Amino acid sequence: MQNKLFIKNKNLKTEIIIKKNYISKFIKGLANKNEKVFCIIDSKVKNSIKFTNQKNVKMFSIKCGEKIKTFDNFKNLSEKLIKNNVNRRSIIVAIGGGTLGDLVGFVASTILRGLDFFLIPTTLLSQVDSSIGGKNGINTNFGKNLLGTFYHPKKVLIDISILSSLPKKQIKSGYAEIIKHALINDYSFFCWLEKNSNSLLNLNKSFLEKAIYKSIKIKLFYVNKDEKEFLLNHNSRAMLNFGHTIGHAIESHYNFKKYNHGESISIGMITEAKISNYLGLLSSIELERIIIHFKKCRLKISDNIIKDKALVNKLTKDKKNFLKNINFSLIDKIGSSIFYKKLDKNKVYKILKNI
């Protein structure tokens, strides 16, 4: 299988490398080519990787989770780098999951007005989703990712060997995003997942590598069509937010404590599939087929907060909204998505009460 992919336009070129047991060699290569290398690493995976001691590599360990995406952590990390004499010939490397990539990418895009950034995602969720496409940022009291930049890493290293250190809960979280890519864009990929989900969830490397590669290809389709999410049609990068309008609201409502990201998005996808069905876009047969697959994989599919007005109030803060409507990325069949712009707050509440 091809092990390299690219994001290319006139302003950037990001190389995405898929390899096994390559993290240490990758860092060593960066150290040999750059004056200073600042590695920010998730404390949970620090002991899973063997690093060679090189004088120009500085390691900072952070205990990660959604809670790190704050003003205070943005300030603290930036000042720590400045205190350690970061300069414009330095590079910054993030080694961890999606929350670390979001925070470090935001720091890299702003410190000294932008430094070269390299990303090594260590969770399945970040490998198939957040590491691709240049989005980063932090949360506010009003919602998730409301402050951030589009800033692409120079290279992304996807090393599937690191996934063996993850608990099953984290693997299922990443699998939810893989299913999302199939649901919005590729019917045949969804059929393949129906047959091979057990192999993926049990970390069979050949199946896993194929699923990661396919997911990244789908995400790149939207990123290359609509890098900064300006379009309002079926090619919009917003299609990648299927399940996320509801999912982000659930995360925010529970202060990121009850569910991890994949679990929230899993509930969000089933809820938004039901909204698609309610609106006459998605057939009941296909809705049931999706629910059956989620149940088979033991993914989260519901939470009582869905029918609470408090959730709708959270939905009004979503970044995709305009003209007082709550905008959704919905599906009209398995493998096909649309941008739906016709629902105000009261209509959404009514739908959620009736699905």
Image (spheres, rainbow, N blue to C red):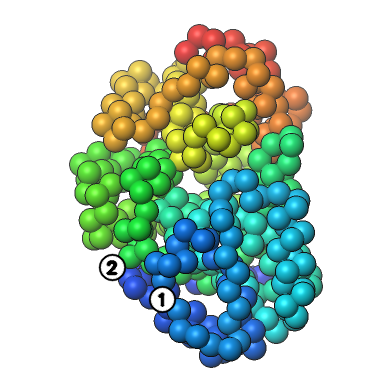
The residue tagged 2 is 1
**Residue 289 in sight in this render:** no
Which residue type does callout 1 highlight? Lys
**Residue 140 in sight in this render:** yes
Helix, strand or loop at disc 2? loop
Where residue 160 appears, as percent x and y from the top left, is 35, 63
For this view, does 106 lie left or right of residue 96?
Answer: right
Helix, strand or loop at disc 1? loop
For this view, does 92 lie left or right of residue 195?
Answer: right
**Earlier residue among tags 2 and 1:** 2
For this view, does 90 lie left or right of residue 20?
Answer: right
Instruction: In the rendered structure, find residue 250 and report the number of the disc placed on it.
Output: none
Residue drawn where x is 40% and y is 46% of the image: 170
Mark 2 neighbour density, 10 Å: few (under 14) some (14–19) many (20 or more):
few
Cβ–Cβ under 8 Å for marks 2 and 1: no
Q: Nearer the viewer, residue 254 or 29?
A: 254
The residue tagged 1 is 50
Where residue 276 appears, as percent x and y from the top left, is 48, 23
Residue drawn where x is 49% and y is 39% of the image: 260
Identify whether 89 is placed above or below 336: below
Mark 1 neighbour density, 10 Å: few (under 14) some (14–19) many (20 or more):
few
Identify whether 141 is placed above or below 167: above
Q: Give the image quarter of residue 287.
A: top left
Q: Nearer the viewer, mark 2 or mark 1?
A: 1
Q: Which quadrant would the N terminus be assigned to in this image? A: bottom left
